[in-house]
Amino acid sequence: MEDKECTELHAKGTDIFAISVVSITSQKAGRYRHRPVTASPAQNESTLIDLSKVRFEPINRQAVEASRLWKDQHFAWCEVVEWKAREPLYLDIAIWHEEQLCGLCFANPNASRKRIRIVRLEGRPREKHPLKNRIGALALIAIEQYAQFLGSNILEIQEPLKGAVSHYQKLGFDFDSQGRLVKNLENRVS
């Protein structure tokens, strides 16, 4: 898709429904605003981050442009703009640390709303950034809030990249009997 087409498609706007979920998620993440966190207890203090510098926004033209600067990008995020026009209940997330784009995610529910497919999820590849190895966990904050809002009880990774499967498994995903990489959200306490 040409850059001009991406810009024109994006000019159609962002779904207010997705903006609301991202806003709710930002508020939830804000609860930890003054508590530096690490991705795992095994990491040393040099990996502490201040979540007050993290923001969740819809994927807009600025995010798409920033993603084009990534080295070895796995996905053409410009396509998300086109998908947003076709998928009324989509959730699109750009994860920023201050002014640096660190990750992107696009997800949408199936027709029954019982399952949410994570169509694309990518952290800034190759290059170091403040949220390295945390993009999946941060995106799941938003996606799980969205799932709760819709009444969905299963998250599914659509066509996971081979190298990413172990990362998803660390986040609670596993293969079901049909070979889909899923995370069951039933029996969770709100």
Image (spheres, grey):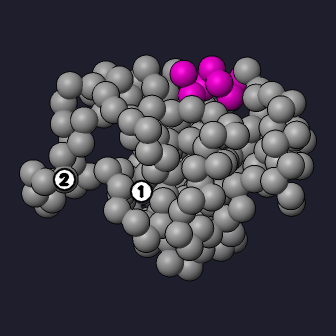
Residue at image mark 1: 171
Q: CA distance from mark 2 to mark 1?
A: 19 Å
- The quarter of the picture where the N terminus appears is bottom right
157 in relation to 135, above or below: below
Q: Position of residue 42 (x, y in %)?
A: 14, 60
- The answer to whether residue 56 is left or right of residue 75 is left
In the image, 160: left or right of 55?
Answer: right
Residue pictured at 49% horizontal, 42% vertical: 95
For the point 9% across and 51% down, which residue is it?
45
Amino acid residing under circle 1: Leu
Residue denoted by label 2: 47
Q: Is residue 9 above or below residue 67?
A: above
Q: Quadrant of residue 157?
A: bottom right
Viewer-side residue, 147 vs 124: 124
28 and 153: which one is in front?
28
Whether tag 2 and tag 1 are in contact, CB under 8 A, the answer is no
Q: Earlier in the sequence, mark 2 or mark 1?
A: 2
Q: Amino acid at mark 2?
A: Thr
Residue at x-position 59% and y-position 67%: 73
Query: What is the magenta segment's predominant secondary structure?
Result: helix
Q: Which residue is at 44% across, 45% downward?
A: 100
Bounds of the magenta segment:
17-23
Is residue 155 in view from this perspective?
A: no
User: Which residue occupies the foreground of this view, 117 or 161?
Assistant: 161
Q: Is residue 78 left or right of residue 167?
A: right
Few, some or many residues within 10 Å of mark 1 (<14, 14–19, 20+): few
Report x, y in % for residue 69: 56, 59
Where is residue 82 drawn, in percent x and y? 85, 47
